[in-house]
C-alpha cells in the first residue's frame, strides 16, 4: 500500500496527455510507459537490496552516509527533507483541495484552508505511530485504485470492438526521434515515489523479507495500472483526443457519464492525492529525524516518542513547513528547483550498491538485485541522462537546484561545528 500510494498521486490522471503530445501513435505511448515502468522496476529492485541490507529509518540518507560520507548524505537531506518533501506535500495537498472543492461545490477560496486542514489531519494521525498512519494510507490507496479501475473500465467500454484504431499512427502528430525520447521524461516522473517505503524501513516487520516483496509487488502493480489506464485513455479519447486534453481523466469520464462523471473522478483524484501526502509526510519526517540524530539538525527533532515510536516533533516541523509553503504559494518554484536534486539522489543512492558489494563482502545481503551490475548501472545511467535532458530543457531550474545543493555545504559545516561545541 505504501509503495502504490507513494507512486500514484495526481500524475497518471494528467501526465499521459504530455506523453501523447510528443508521440505519433498510441503504440508509441504504450511503449514509452512500458519502458518507463521497466526502468523504474530496475530501480525498485536495487532499492530492495539496499533496504534489505540496511532496514532502518532514513532510507537513501543512510545509504549515502555509509557509502560516501556525511556530507553527501546531508546534502540529500537538505534538499529532500527540508525542501522537496514539504514542497511536494504542499503542492499535492493543494491539488487535493482543488479537486475536493470542485467535487462538493465549494468556492475556490476554500482551497488553501482545506489543504492546510488536510496536512494538519495527516500529521495528527501519524503522531499516534505507524499503525495509525497505515490505516489512513490503506483506506486511501484502496480508493485511488478504485478510481484507476473505474477509468480502465470506462475506457474499454467506450472502445467496444474498435480498440485497434486507438493505436494507429496519427499523421497530425509526426514527431522527430529526439522529441520521442524526451517524452519518456514525464512518464518517469509519474513513476517516482517508490523510495518512501525505504524511508520507513525501521518500522517494517521482518524488513529483509518484507521490503523486497513489497517493493516488487507494489511497483509491479503500479506499472500494470499505468499501462491499462493509458490503454483506456487511448480507447476512449483516441491518440489525438488524449494529446489535446488538459484533463484526460475528467474528459474520459465525461464522455460516458457527463458532468457527473467528471465529479466522480474528481473525488477519486482527491483521494489519490490525499493518500500521497500521508506517505510523503511520514517518510520525510523519518529522514529529518535521522538527520537530527546525526547532529545535522536541531536536536529535539531527533526525539522518538517511547509509546508510539513516532518522530512526533519531526512530523510537526515538516507539517508546519509544508503549511507555510501553502500559505506563501512558493512551493511550485521550490519543486521545479529541486527536481534535479531529487533524481541525483536516486542515482547516487542506487550507486551505493556498488560500494556495499565491494566493501561488505563479509555481510551478505538477504536479498540481491538480479542482473548485477547491469541493472543498477542501466538505471543510474538512465537517470543521469534524464537529469541532463532536464537541465537542457530548463537550465534555470537546474541551475537553481544545483545552487540549493551548494548552499547546503556551508550549512553542513556550520551544523558540524555546533554539534562539536554541544
Image: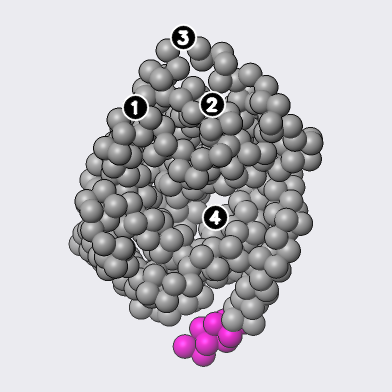
**Front disc: 2 or 4:** 2
Image quarter of residue 217: top left
- Considering only order in the chain, which callout, 4 or 2, is on the residue closer to the N terminus? 4
Q: Which mark is residue 298?
A: none
Question: Secondary structure under badge 4?
Answer: helix
**Front disc: 3 or 4:** 3
- In magenta segment, residue 421: yes
- Considering only order in the chain, which callout, 2 or 1, is on the residue closer to the N terminus? 2
Q: Which residue is mark 3?
A: 161
The stretch of residues the image draws in magenta is 413-422
Give the spatial CA distance, label 2 vs label 4: 40 Å
Give the spatial CA distance, label 4 vs label 1: 44 Å
27 to the left or right of 94: right
Q: Residue at x 31, y 71 (%)?
A: 316
> Which percent across, then down, holds residue 275?
33, 48
Q: Which residue is mark 4?
A: 60
Question: Secondary structure under badge 1?
Answer: helix
Q: Is residue 244 above or below residue 289?
A: above
Q: Residue at x 45, y 50 (%)?
A: 196
Q: Are marks 3 and 4 in contact (CB under 8 Å)?
A: no
Q: Which residue is mark 1?
A: 256
**Front disc: 4 or 1:** 1
406 to the left or right of 323: right
- Considering only order in the chain, which callout, 4 or 3, is on the residue closer to the N terminus? 4
Q: Is residue 178 visible?
A: yes
Amino acid at each position: 500500500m505504501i509503495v502504490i500510494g507513494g507512486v500514484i498521486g495526481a500524475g497518471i490522471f494528467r501526465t499521459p496527455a504530455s506523453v501523447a503530445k510528443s508521440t505519433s501513435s498510441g503504440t508509441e505511448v504504450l511503449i514509452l510507459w512500458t519502458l518507463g515502468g521497466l526502468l523504474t522496476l530496475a530501480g525498485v529492485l536495487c532499492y530492495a537490496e539496499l533496504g534489505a541490507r540496511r532496514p532502518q529509518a532514513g532510507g537513501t540518507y543512510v545509504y549515502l552516509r555509509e557509502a560516501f560520507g556525511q556530507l553527501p548524505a546531508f546534502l540529500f537531506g537538505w534538499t529532500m527533507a527540508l525542501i522537496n518533501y514539504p514542497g511536494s506535500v504542499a503542492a499535492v495537498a493543494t491539488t487535493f483541495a482543488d479537486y475536493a472543492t470542485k467535487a462538493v461545490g465549494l468556492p475556490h477560496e476554500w482551497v488553501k484552508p482545506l489543504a492546510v486542514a488536510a496536512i494538519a489531519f495527516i500529521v495528527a494521525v501519524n503522531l499516534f505511530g505507524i499503525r495509525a498512519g497505515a490505516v489512513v494510507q490503506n483506506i486511501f490507496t484502496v480508493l485511488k485504485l478504485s478510481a484507476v479501475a473505474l477509468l480502465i473500465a470506462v475506457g474499454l467500454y467506450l472502445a467496444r470492438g474498435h480498440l485497434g484504431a486507438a493505436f494507429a499512427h496519427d499523421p497530425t502528430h509526426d514527431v522527430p526521434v529526439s522529441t520521442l525520447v524526451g517524452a519518456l521524461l514525464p512518464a518517469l516522473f509519474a513513476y517516482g515515489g517508490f523510495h518512501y517505503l525505504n524511508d520507513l524501513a525501521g518500522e517494517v516487520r521482518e524488513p529483509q523479507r518484507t521490503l523486497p516483496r513489497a517493493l516488487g509487488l507494489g511497483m509491479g502493480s503500479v506499472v500494470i495500472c499505468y499501462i491499462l489506464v493509458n490503454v483506456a485513455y487511448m480507447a476512449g479519447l483516441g491518440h489525438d483526443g488524449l494529446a489535446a486534453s488538459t484533463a484526460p481523466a475528467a474528459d474520459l469520464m465525461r464522455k460516458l457519464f457527463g458532468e457527473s462523471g467528471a465529479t466522480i473522478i474528481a473525488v477519486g483524484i482527491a483521494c489519490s492525492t490525499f493518500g500521497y501526502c500521508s506517505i510523503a509526510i511520514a517518510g520525510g519526517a523519518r529522514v529529518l529525524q535521522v538527520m537530527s540524530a546525526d547532529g545535522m539538525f536541531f536536536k529535539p527533532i531527533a526525539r522518538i516518542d517511547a509509546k508510539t515510536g513516532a518522530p512526533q516533533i519531526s512530523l510537526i516541523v515538516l507539517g508546519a513547513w509544508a503549511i507555510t509553503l501553502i500559505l506563501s504559494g512558493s512551493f511550485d518554484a521550490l519543486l521545479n528547483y529541486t527536481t534535479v536534486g531529487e533524481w541525483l539522489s536516486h542515482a547516487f543512492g542506487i550507486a551505493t550498491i556498488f560500494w556495499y558489494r565491494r566493501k561488505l563482502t563479509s555481510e551478505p545481503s538477504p536479498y540481491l538485485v538480479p542482473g548485477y551490475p547491469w541493472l543498477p548501472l542501466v538505471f543510474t545511467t538512465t537517470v543521469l541522462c534524464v537529469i541532463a535532458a532536464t537541465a537542457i530543457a530548463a537550465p534555470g531550474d537546474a541551475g537553481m537546484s544545483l545552487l540549493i545543493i551548494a548552499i547546503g555545504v556551508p550549512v553542513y559545516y556550520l551544523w558540524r561545528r555546533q554539534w562539536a561545541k554541544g
